[in-house]
Image: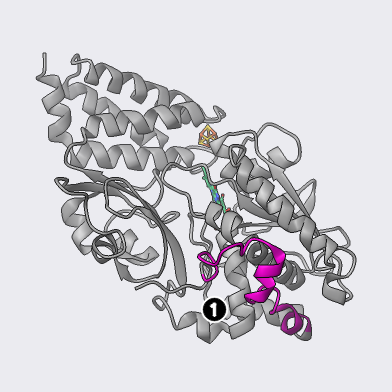
Amino acid sequence: MQVKIVSENFDIPDAYTLKVAQENGRYSTIEKLFSMNPEDVTEEVVKSGLRGKGGGGAPCGPKWKLMPKDDPRPSYLIVNGDESEPGTFKDRQIFEYDPHLLIEGIICTSYAMNIHEAYIYIRGEYKFWSDRVDAAIEEAYEAGIIGEKVMGNDFSLNITVHRGGGAYICGEKSALIESLEGKRGHPRLKPHQKECEWFFGNPATVNNVETIASVPYIVANGSDAYREFGTKSSPGTMLFAMSGPVKNPGVYELPFGTKMIDFINTLGGGMQDGKKLKALIPGGSSCPILTAEEVENAVLDYESMWDIGSTLGTGGMIVIDDSANMVEVAKNLIEFYHHESCGQCTPCREGTGWIDKILKNVLEGSGSEEDLNTILDVCGTMNGKTICVFAPAVSDIITSIVKKFRSEFILEFNKN
Ligand SMILES: Cc1cc2nc3c(=O)[nH]c(=O)nc-3n(C[C@H](O)[C@H](O)[C@H](O)COP(=O)(O)O)c2cc1C
Ligand code: SF4
């Protein structure tokens, strides 16, 4: 069931060191890379159908093409390793077990877009992982893999690691750039037309860690090889994280199109003894929840998840068993989002706080059916009216829990 493209070296002892990494294929794509035109590298990534793994699933190659051509300003690659969403813990596997794959991916991506400065933005709490990446970058500089002449080629590349300050919203690409510019991590208003990002007024591309780590395979083997896995519209693989009361929680690389229940029952080992599957949040905590019946039919690709009213997100699956109180699940989530709202937009800042207060009352036994209508109403005001998609995502997950598990909220009303 597993297909190891990004995770190929995860089980090799010490593969995070340059010596072992090189013995196991790292940097072997660079010779081929520099024999290609940068435009051809981008075309190959377009043809591969590689989609961003940071949550939105945007096609990667077309995004690279948004970078202006022949622009006199310096351009930047910003690698998003903020990974702060509950249930999502895949990028840190790359940092920990194969940081040289990420560096190789950064070289390929930078060459394709004629970029000479790259930043890796790492979650503030990820001290261990940030140190590991720093050590790998240092080794790469010392070996001449990056720096003035990338592996002896007439191409320079610097890579800098930046650790965030611990705010979930700094994973949103424009908030991340604000933070990297030394400002408060507030998302920016987006233009209607598609364009690249802007870092200190210079063209920039933001990609997720896993997206970048997928590029060397495509450069080395070609787009057709990548398309051998997955589905027509969701080609390739993804690192799926599984947490909760299953026998073997962890991170597994699977081709898109895998049945969710097969994944849970095989690699996940099934539910722990005495536990029954009740619900599942599929792609990090901001994706609409699935009931156990929906999980039976769910397929792990972007389109299939949209078809059943949820999203694939980051692939971080949170398994919930029948001992969980779904009102407590909703309260736990809203506390997080209330705390993490950046506060720029009234519907988000106030809405998350109101829902938090209402659910507190419900759990204290003083709720009523009217409260559920108020929650749904507040969720309605959070959807489509804010600067970034944080608020709509919160609205979707809370609405889905209230609608699918309404009876559990009613039980709380009747406790007193
Ligand atoms: C609230 C919020 C948090 C996000 N957090 C992350 C994150 O931690 N890592 C990430 O790669 N993308 C995150 N994203 C998505 C980024 O804005 C962006 O789409 C992504 O980094 C682009 O890379 P990709 O196309 O390779 O997926 C977040 C988006 C939102 C709205
Ligand atoms: S939706 Fe929320 S997190 Fe996003 S900009 Fe508005 S207040 Fe900030």
Name the amino acid, label 1: Ser
Instruction: Give the magenta range.
Output: 8-34
Q: Quadrant of residue 34?
A: bottom right
Q: Is residue 168 left or right of residue 287?
A: right
> Is 205 covered by the magenta stretch?
no
The image's colouring method is one colour
Q: Residue at x 29, y 38 (%)?
A: 399
| Front residue of this view, candidates 117 and 72 | 117
Q: Is residue 413 left or right of residue 357?
A: left
Taking depth in this image into account, of 20 and 119 the one nearest to the observer is 20
Quadrant of residue 60 within the rendered picture: bottom right
| Farthest-out residue, front | 13
- Neighbourhood count class around disc 1 (C-alpha, 10 Å): few under 14, some 14–19, many 20 upward: many
Q: State whether label 1 is within 8 Å of ligand 1.
A: no
Residue drawn at the location 76% of the way across and 49% of the way down: 199
Q: Is residue 216 above or below residue 361?
A: below
Q: What residue would you read off at disc 1?
A: 48
Task: Report the side of 269 relative to 353 (left or right).
Answer: left
Q: Residue 234: horizontal and vertical position, in percent?
A: 43, 71
Question: Which percent across, then down, holds residue 187?
Answer: 61, 39
Residue 244 against residue 207 in the figure, above or below: above
Residue 188 seen in render: no
Query: Residue 326 appears at what percent x and percent y?
Result: 22, 34
User: Based on the displayed image, in which of its 4 quarters is residue 118 positioned?
Assistant: bottom right
Whether residue 32 appears in magenta in the rendering, the answer is yes
Q: How many marks?
A: 1
Query: Which quadrant is the C terminus positioned in?
Result: top left
Check the picture and name the quadrant holding the N terminus: bottom left
Would residue 106 be seen by someone viewing this image from the given angle?
yes
Q: Position of residue 167 (x, y in %)?
A: 57, 34
Query: Relative to 274, does residue 334 appear above or below in the rendering?
Result: above
| Secondary structure beneath label 1 | helix
